[in-house]
Amino acid sequence: METPESIRLQLRLARAGIASRRKCEEIIAEGRVSVNGQFVTKLGFKVTPDDVVRFDGRLVKDEKRKVYIALHKPSGYLCSDFDPEGRPLAKDLIDVVIKERIFHVGRLDYMTSGLLFFANDGDFSRVLTHPSSQIEKEYHVITRSLIPDNLMERFSRGVVIDGIRYNAVLAKKVGPRSARIVLIEGKNRELHRVFSSESVSVKKIHRIRIGPVKIAGIPSGHFRYLKVNEIKALMKYARMQGEAAHSKWRK
């Protein structure tokens, strides 16, 4: 019988700072979580505060302090908790200072540098990474060859590559081999695919902004805590966009 305090197991893990709620679902499905000594793989499983939950054998405790971080990720760092190839992990730049268990909110490709959020708040991660959040992400792109003017125009209007539509909120040349791009969706390797469609090789991608938060003032490999007003602004904007998208769908 369920009690008023019972919540889904993935939510319990997310609130404890294990990972985002979506990632916690994957962790449960992999059989890495036990409740009262029994391994659980069912995503709808509910737990109460009295249940003993373990992840990879370690006791799961609710994080008392919520941590929100803006990291300047250098290129050559992986957004993952582990890499069998032994490549550097972005979280290692933070773990040496932060004692709380934190996870990346969204991600950047291995060779892409720039602004990346970390937190131990599953709700914060879920809201910001949900497809309906519509939060702008701004990039500075440097290429090895000249950028055709029509490429930026096409990207702004929307371009279809291999059956997938890519659409920038803003795509503007700022130099013969550099561009400023603002995206909302951020599909897998979107910038690489769009530029390579015109045989333009990308040399560097650097994310300089997520919503109202800018990377300015954070040296490469360093981080700062997000301000309370920045957290509120990010959550408010994401939720407003999500509600607007839901209302549009219902119509």
Image (cartoon, grey):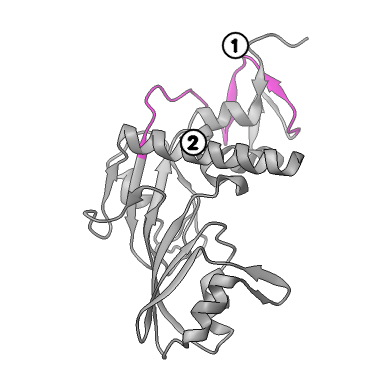
In the displayed structure, would residue 63 be above or below residue 250?
A: above
Which structural element holds mark 2? helix
User: Quarter holding the C terminus?
Assistant: top right
Q: Residue at x 59, y 37 (%)?
A: 21
Answer yes or no: is residue 9 visible: yes
Q: Which residues are magenta?
A: 42-68
Of callouts 1 and 2, which one flags the residue occurring earlier in the amino acid sequence?
1
Front one among 175 and 20: 175
The type of residue carrying mark 2 is: Phe
Compared across the picture, whether 64 is left or right of 185 comes to left
Mark 1 neighbour density, 10 Å: few (under 14) some (14–19) many (20 or more): few
Toward which corner of the image does residue 239 lie, by quadrant?
top right
Between the C-alphas of marks 1 and 2, the distance is: 25 Å
Residue 51 within the segment the image draws in magenta = yes
Determine which of the numbered discs, if any, sits on residue 50 in the image.
1
Judge whether 211 appears above or below 88 on screen.
above
Residue beneath disc 2: 124
Considering the image in quadrants, where does the N terminus appear?
top right
